[in-house]
Structure formats: structure tokens, C-alpha cells
Image (spheres, rainbow, N blue to C red):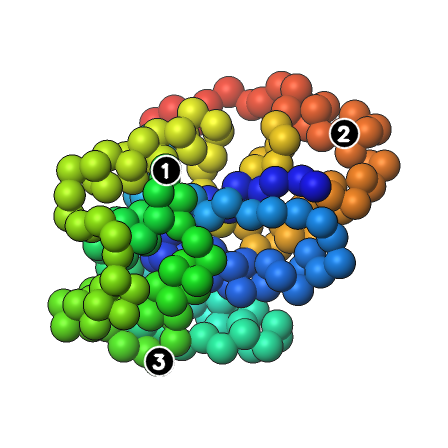
Amino acid sequence: MKRITFYLDFISPYAYLAFEKLPQALQGLSYAVDYRPILFAGLLKHHGQLGPAEIAPKRDWTYRQVLWLAHSNGIAMQMPAAHPFNPLALLRLALACGENGFANRYVCETLFRHVWRGGADASDAQRFEAVKAALNPARDPASDPVKAELKANTEEAIARGLFGVPAYAVDEKLFWGFDALPMLRGYLEADPWFAQGDWDAAAQRPGAPRRGPA
């Protein structure tokens, strides 16, 4: 049985879609999933990138596309009242409900749906207190150990080569994005493509020189 590490941040609509779709996408296979919350903004900072919502035309396209993907895949989804928002409290709450840097599927489902269903404000203080009470975390989400777990998770993700969410790690391979779920399934089914060398060869191609000032 393969073990998948699912890296997520509740701010990401693609992570929500992938989370909802995963059981159907991998139906019939033998696998286990560890859900590891990380701070997507930490990946962006490390790689010197802007988030999709920080580029106005890309922001508009992202919101249109994710709503279409939800519609076409039969996933209930409404944009939160404001996006992007600060996801730190939700990430820490997820970790406070778990241990060793992981959260269980029920907790992640509750928090994803807190953000991506109903169209409410994902960072509203009263709503946060309500979902916190419902989940009844074993630890204080604002405690130093929980904060340290989130930082460690994010640093581990960067060291592993992650650049975005959702990402799925299996063996020594990383898969990124909602649209990578069929590829992930192919790997778990031992599709012969993965033994033909293209996976490794793709990372060996020489790149163009880095762009300088115009």
C-alpha cells in the first residue's frame, strides 16, 4: 500500500477541489493519506513569486476557472466573501487538532468547507470561534508548539521541492495541482510510462539564461 502526503493550505481553491476529488480520483486503489498543512505564502516567498491572486488578470481567471472546475466535477463551491485572506489561524487550528504536523481528513474537510462553501468571510472572528468550538482542538492553536509545527511543515515542504499547493508526495515523487490527480493515479497503478525515463529526463533539460532587466 502506497502512502501519500497531501500538502495543503486552506487559502487555495485548487487544494479544496483536489481534497474533495481525491477519494473519487483514486477509487479502487490501496493507499493511505497523511494531510500536512503548510503556509503557501512561505513557498511563494522562498521562490520569489507572486500568488495567483496578486496578479489582477490571473486572479480573475483563477476564480472563473475554479468555479468552472467545481461545476464540471460536481463539487459544491462558492467563493468566500474576500480572497485572498490570512489562513494562519485555520492552518494552526488544523494542526492543533492533530499531532506530529498532520491533520485528519475530517478536520481538513471541516476547514476547507468553512472557507469554500456558503460564500461567508473565511477570516471572520466569530465564525472562527464557532468552527474552533466544533472541532474542539486538543491543543491551543495559538501556542508556540503549534506555530512551530506549521513553520516546520513549510520548511520541510520547501526542502522537498514544493512550489505550490495542492501537492502530493509518494515515494520520492511529487505531483502538483488538481489536474495532476490522474497522473498520481497512474503512478499508483504502476503505469509503465514512469519506468521509461521521461520523468527523470524532464529535469535534466538545459534551460534558457535567466531574464535580466529589460
Report the front residue among 60 and 40.
40
Where, quadrant-wise, is the C terminus in this rendering? top left
Crowdedness of circle 3 by 10 Å Cα count: few (<14), some, many (20+)?
some
* Residue type, mark 3 in image: Gly
Residue at 48% over, 27% down: 160
- Badge number at residue 198: 2
Displayed quadrant of residue 68: bottom right
* Residue type, mark 1 in image: Asn
Q: CA distance from mark 2 to mark 1?
A: 35 Å
Res. 88 visible in picture: no
Residue at 58% over, 42% down: 4
Mark 3–mark 2 contact, CB under 8 Å? no
Displayed quadrant of residue 128: bottom left
- Badge number at residue 100: 1
Left or right relative to 178: residue 210 = left
Mark 3–mark 1 contact, CB under 8 Å? no
Where, quadrant-wise, is the N terminus in this rendering? top right
- Badge number at residue 118: 3
Q: Secondary structure at mark 2?
A: helix
**Discs 2/1, front:** 1
As drawn, the residue found furthest toward the front would be 138
Residue at 22% over, 68% down: 133
Q: Secondary structure at mark 3?
A: loop
Report the front residue among 73 and 134.
134
Crowdedness of circle 1 by 10 Å Cα count: few (<14), some, many (20+)?
few
Left or right relative to 104: residue 173 = right
Res. 136 visible in picture: yes
**Discs 3/2, front:** 3
Query: x, y (%) of residue 26?
Result: 69, 56
